[in-house]
Image (spheres, grey):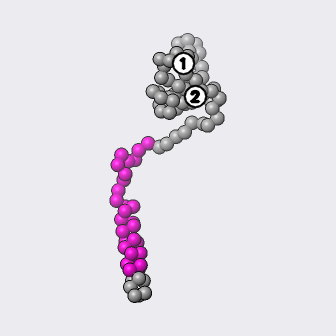
């Protein structure tokens, strides 16, 4: 009976070797290629929201820029690295 166990183990390993690569070569995942993931810095210096209870917008700041904006809840990030352009329309442009 020991030889039967060895034979079964050999068959199972052989099947894994044959079927394994086919599983990887089955094609792309649904929705592929998808977007790359990106994260803002973890060095946040501020988190804020409006003073009124009607606002559902939260934000974080780091390095002088708004790093994330959350809406409609504080656990749903919608914007990363929001920067502001300040100008008078003709003589200067300042990136904030």
- Among the 4 quarters of the image, the one containing residue 59: top right
Any mark on residue 9, and which?
Answer: none
The image shows residue 61 at horizontal and vertical percentages of 60, 28
Q: Is residue 80 above or below residue 90?
A: below
**Residue 79, can we see it?**
no
Query: Residue 50 got which mark?
Result: 1
Name which residue lies at 39% across and 75% down: 12
Whether residue 12 appears in magenta in the rendering, the answer is yes
> In front here: 75 or 84?
75
**Residue at horizontal 41%, vertical 78%?**
9
Please tell me which of labels 2 and 1 falls first in the chain: 1
Against 25, residue 35 (above or below) is above
Task: Reply above or below: 63 against 13.
Answer: above
| Magenta highlight: main SS | helix
Q: Residue furthest front?
A: 1
Q: Which sits in the foreground, 26 or 16?
A: 16
Q: Which residue is mark 2?
A: 60
Q: Secondary structure beneath disc 1? A: loop
Q: Residues within 10 Å of mark 2 (few under 14, many from 20)?
A: some
**Is residue 35 shown to the viewer in this render?**
yes
Residue 22 within the segment the image draws in magenta: yes
**Residue 95: image x %, image y %?**
59, 23
**Mark 1 nearby-residue class (10 Å; few <14, some 14–19, many ≥20):** few
Question: Quick one: SS at disc 2?
Answer: strand
- Magenta extent: 8-35
Percent coordinates x, y for residue 31 in the rendering: 36, 46
| Spot occupied by residue 65 in the image (x, y as percentages of width and height) | 60, 26
The quadrant in which the C terminus is found is: top right
User: Quarter holding the N terminus?
Assistant: bottom left
Q: Quadrant of residue 13?
A: bottom left
Q: Rounded to the nearest whole Å, what is the CA distance between mark 2 and mark 1?
A: 12 Å
Residue drawn at the location 48% of the way across and 33% of the way down: 76
């Amino acid at each position: 009976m020991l030889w039967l166990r060895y034979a079964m183990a050999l068959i199972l390993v052989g099947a894994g070797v044959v079927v394994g690569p086919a599983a990887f070569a089955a094609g792309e995942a649904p929705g592929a290629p998808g977007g790359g993931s990106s994260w803002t810095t973890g060095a946040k210096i501020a988190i804020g929201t409006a003073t009124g209870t009607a606002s559902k917008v939260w934000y974080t700041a780091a390095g002088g820029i708004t790093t994330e904006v959350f809406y409609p809840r504080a656990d749903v990030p919608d914007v990363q690295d929001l920067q502001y352009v300040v100008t008078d329309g003709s003589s200067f442009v300042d990136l904030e």
